[in-house]
Amino acid sequence: MLSLRRSTLKYLQVRDYLRTLVLSELRTGDPVPSERMLCERFGVSRMTVRQAVDALVVEGVLERVQGRGTFVAPPKVDLQVRLASFTEEMTRRGMTAGVKVLSAGFAPAEHDIAEALKVAPGENLIHLHRLRLADDEPMAVEHTWLPAGRLPGFLDGAVPASVYVELDARGLIPDWGEDTIDAGEADHEEAKLLHIKPGKPVLRISRRAFTGDSAIEYSRSAFRSDRYTLWVPVARPNPSVVPRRRSVAPDATT
């Protein structure tokens, strides 16, 4: 038991040392000290060092590059769940948003998409397939569907750089919506676009956005989980409203 406790303390020392090094001295892309150096510095086994490094890799502080070593990972972007465009979110963080349109055109509404947008199956929709970038780095692959009947001329000329800016110009900016968030794995196409390996974890977000009572946008996005951490503000629910019991009037005869 004592031996296990000492091993745990050594593991925490190595982990905390590396974390402090990243925060105070190293920059993104810098290599961390080798396993041999850490073993000699702390008098621990390679297994202990690897456990400490593994913990920081899982947290997204470090990243391993096969055949090269372990490096400081790029900082994660906190993805706040709110009704805002990708451009607005990146600008709020001081990053330059970019977009690469992979395809844009019209498509008949498949059953699940028709249900999401509250239109008839087969109805004509605008479909955008885009790669979203921040500071020129790929962040997310996005499919967006919009009701073509409500957006005449949307695809005339260049595809709008921001869907929400275009919707705002038409008086159709969404005023409420709902997101569904799931964990997933990148398929081969997504992996190639996001510069990650197939099967790597991604954050899948499906969104329905509404203008009044009408759905105006449905999207499905795959975000790089190594670059995003999900931030959801929470608050205590309001207390339930429970009607007071009526007081029973005393019997006048008693």
Image (cartoon, rainbow, N blue to C red):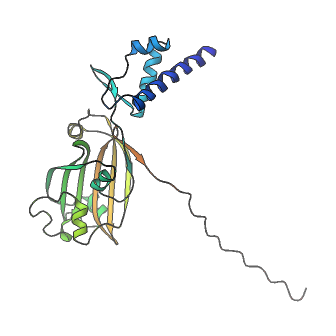
The quarter of the image holding the N terminus is top right
The answer to which quarter of the image holds residue 156 is bottom left
- Residue 19: give x, y in percent of width and height: 44, 29
As rendered, which of 77 and 105 lies closer to the eye?
77
Farthest residue in the bottom direction?
A: 253
Q: Is residue 93 above or below residue 196?
A: below
Give the quarter of the image for residue 211: bottom left
Pick whichever, 97 or 239, lies toward us. 97
Q: Which image quarter: residue 224?
A: top left
Q: Left or right: 161 with respect to 47?
A: left
Where residue 165 sits in the image (x, y, percent)? 24, 63
Name the residue located 46 percent from the left edge and 13 percent from the top edge.
41
With 21 as the anchor, is 68 left or right in this view?
left
Residue 93 sits above or below residue 56 on the image: below
The residue at 39%/15% (across/down) is 35
**Residue at image location 25% in from the left, 72% down from the top:** 171
